[in-house]
Image (tube, grey):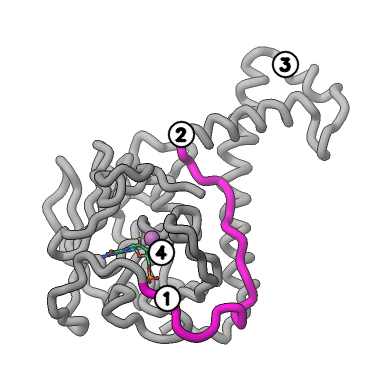
Amino acid sequence: MPDPTVPQSLTEGAAERQMARLTRRSFVTGAVAGLAGFGAWHWLRTAGPEDGLPWPLRRVLGFNRAVAESLGAPHRLAPTFPADSARGLARTNGLVGLEDEIDAANWQLRVQHDGGPAQRMIGLRALQDLPQVDLVTELKCVEGWSQVIHFSGVRFLDFATRFGLATRSGRPPDLVSNSQDLYRYVYLATPDEEYYVGLDIASALHPQTLLCDTMNGQPLNRQHGAPLRLYLPVKYGYKSLKRIGLIRFQDDRPRDYWADRGYDWYAGH
Ligand SMILES: Nc1nc2c(c(=O)[nH]1)N[C@H]1C(S)=C(S)[C@@H](COP(=O)(O)O)O[C@H]1N2
Ligand SMILES: [Mo]
């Protein structure tokens, strides 16, 4: 179980460092390489700084960021809050796919790869070795309410890396220099597939995307998705699947319960 007394800044700091690394590598390296390719290195170095960066690089960064945004790639961290801002009972919304009885003690995640290796079953005990993460952020429901919630669990990124799930080679995911190796999307569903969500791989591997077993310091109850749910603060709440039974990596854009009912597939806010 994660320790809710761990200072938030530790986990936040780690996530920020990782994000900074990803961002630097994807945007700065790409931008410099692109400019150097046009023989512009000298021009770049002699131009005056803007925001501490030579301005041509700044422009390219802005451009790359806009492209990434239009592709739906998350590059920002959602704002976090002090742990004591998440108090009391969390509101419950949406019970689709939560009707059946569950056997939490023997829970197995069914993991599939479209056109890839055979199905695997992964028990929840296997998640206990992964770094435990605390995250206090706002859960935003598209219906117009939001709530600060303290979620604890493991990063989806760490889970996918440990079991070699996100890539065709089974190697750790590398969004920057080996994106071809990555499956493009992840589909997650309740065991009965009554509720299901689709995520682009960048959102699934975002450092704040968690597989959670704890909410506001309490083990998840049935209505909140026991024994394991997804939570990602960079999207509306309808992407945060409760009661995960099936995880499938694929290249076709997966179906999504609320997108099938007219809501935006990406669900960014
Ligand atoms: N299985 C399942 N997961 C779900 C839903 C649902 O109906 N079934 N509703 C979603 C919606 S619309 C929201 S806002 C959040 C709410 O999470 P909470 O009930 O823990 O606050 O769960 C999401 N995950
Ligand atoms: Mo929602």
Q: Which of marks 2 and 1 is nearer the N terminus?
A: 2
The quarter of the picture where the N terminus appears is bottom left
Mark 3 lies within 8 Å of ligand 2 (Cβ measured): no
Q: Does the residue labelled 1 lie within 8 Å of ligand 1?
A: yes
Q: What element carries label 1?
A: loop
For mark 2, does the 10 Å Cα neighbourhood hold few (<14), some (14 to 19), or many (20 or more) residues? few
Residue located at (35% from left, 64% from top): 230
Three-letter code for the amino acid on which mark 1 is drawn: Arg
Mark 2 vs mark 1, foreground winner is 1
User: In this rendering, which labeled residue sits more in front, label 4 or label 3?
Assistant: 4
Image coordinates for residue 110, horizontal then vertical, percent: 17, 62
Tell me the residue that label 2 is attached to. Answer: 71
Q: Which residue lies furthest to the top in this view?
A: 38
Residue pointed to by mark 4: 231
Q: Does the magenta stretch include residue 34?
A: no
**Which residue: 49% across, 64% down?**
145
Q: Does the magenta stretch include residue 80?
A: yes
* Amino acid type of the residue tagged 4 in the rendering: Tyr
Q: Which stretch appears magenta?
A: 72-92
Amino acid found under the numbered disc labelled 2: Leu
Secondary structure of the residue carrying tag 2 is loop
Q: Residue at x 61, y 66 (%)?
A: 80
Query: Is 211 left or right of 168, judged from the image as shown?
Result: right
Residue depth check, mark 3 versus mark 1: number of the one nearer the observer = 1
Q: What residue type is labelled 3?
A: Ala
